[in-house]
Amino acid sequence: MPAIKVSDLTKRYNSFTAVDRISFEVPEGTIFGFLGPNGAGKTTTISMLCTLLRPTSGEASVNGYDCIREPSRVRESIGIVFQETTLDKDLTAFENLYYHAILYNVQRHRRKDLVRKALRFVGLYDRKDEPVKRFSGGMKRRLEVARAVVHQPRILFLDEPTLGLDPQSRTSLWEFITRLPSEEGVTVFMTTHYMDEAEVCHNIAIIDNGRIIAKGSPDELKKGIGSDLIYIKVTDKEEAVRLIRDRLSLNPLRKGEELSIPVTGGEACIPELIRTIGDLAVSVRIQRPTLNDVFLNLTGKAIREEEQDSSDTIKDSIREYRRRFDRR
Ligand code: ATP
């Protein structure tokens, strides 16, 4: 039985369709990334799965419980970390978790042990008696993850868990999240618009304008693009381009100091390329497509504006690749 099963799930706000007939499954004990740009429908979806929002149509089950007919069962079996912090800043870390354990009907004799275990899990046991208002942003997020797992849910929902955190806090939070499936048997469903986070997920679905436009493992999605990029620095660009075109029927693009060449099956092409241009070669590197390239390929835009520039090279290459493909 999948941990989460969604079929044709839809949410409309008046005439606006925020989530449009989405379907996917999340296998138990895996990390599932729900990836998409701002306003794509991620929070709306997570809210429906957590029974905070009633779907307009379609079906969803979580831990085998129906999200519309059995909301209490769903809620008992999940943990949630919202985008905005919901900790009580005047209480200590221990108290925040302890009150949560009471709310979730954790048996009295188990509460303290479970709270301590969760605090140790996220590395905050030594700070357990400090009020949360003294914690940094990263520590608060870790504490929220600890609170969300204190009642031992089978699925943890995280809505943009690392939003606004500095790189070090993001890394440390990620370490805890990625340990959850193997150490605690927890299935993780998380929304993100960070590519590097989506890369670590077992499976992802990419949502844009309320629709799922791709799903699979990160590798499967990237393979779907069909090309790697070889970047090669040469002493004479014109001559190298001529040789590569004439002898290998490849079409190098000039990119700053380098030539970029879209190829299928990256490394295998390098020896022939070097043989072809001989001494003209100064250095070679290979770049695999990223999930942002997958998104770019499907929608023609970057998932985050900041990623647009770094993706321009790949966009050019994809365009070129398609042009050549269409000509065949
Ligand atoms: P972000 O990454 O910015 O959180 P998101 O992918 O989570 O974005 P949602 O919050 O699910 O996106 O919003 C999806 C769309 O639905 C957006 O266009 C949003 O403006 C719209 N929307 C969300 N809530 C409501 C509401 N209560 N009434 C009307 N429209 C809404």
Image (cartoon, helix red, strand yellow):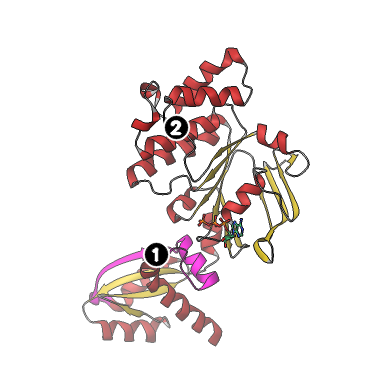
Instruction: Report the residue that reaches farthest toward the right.
Output: 69
Magenta span of residues = 278-306
| Mark 1 surroundings within 10 Å by alpha-carbon count, few (fewer than 14), some (14 through 19), many (20 or more) | some
Q: Is residue 328 visible?
A: no
- Identified at 46% across, 31% down, the residue is 88
Instruction: Report the residue that reaches farthest toward the top.
Output: 109
Question: Is residue 311 found inside the magenta-colored segment of the image?
Answer: no
User: Residue 104 or 303: which is nearer the viewer?
Assistant: 104
Quarter of the displayed picture in which ligand 1 can be seen: bottom right
- Identified at 52% across, 22% down, the residue is 98
Residue 84, given in percent of the width and then of the height, sits at 48, 44
Instruction: Name which quarter of the figure residue 298 lies in.
Output: bottom right
- The numbered mark at residue 143 is 2
Question: Is residue 303 found inside the magenta-colored segment of the image?
Answer: yes
Q: Quadrant of the N terminus?
A: top right
- The numbered mark at residue 307 is 1
Kind of residue sitting beneath label 2: Leu
Residue 218, given in percent of the width and then of the height, sits at 52, 55
**Mark 2 or mark 1, which has the lower sequence index?**
2
Relative vertical location of residue 247 with respect to residue 40 in this rendering, above or below: below
Relative vertical location of residue 94 with respect to residue 27 in this rendering, above or below: above
| Mark 2 surroundings within 10 Å by alpha-carbon count, few (fewer than 14), some (14 through 19), many (20 or more) | many
| Helix, strand or loop for disc 2 | helix
User: Residue 220 or 311: which is nearer the viewer?
Assistant: 311
Residue 124, given in percent of the width and then of the height, sits at 39, 27
Kind of residue sitting beneath label 1: Glu
Closest to the camera, between mark 2 and mark 1, is 2
234 relative to 23 in the view: left or right: left
Relative vertical location of residue 169 with respect to residue 9 in this rendering, above or below: above
| Helix, strand or loop for disc 1 | helix
Relative vertical location of residue 286 with respect to residue 167 in this rendering, above or below: below
Residue 60, given in percent of the width and then of the height, sits at 72, 48
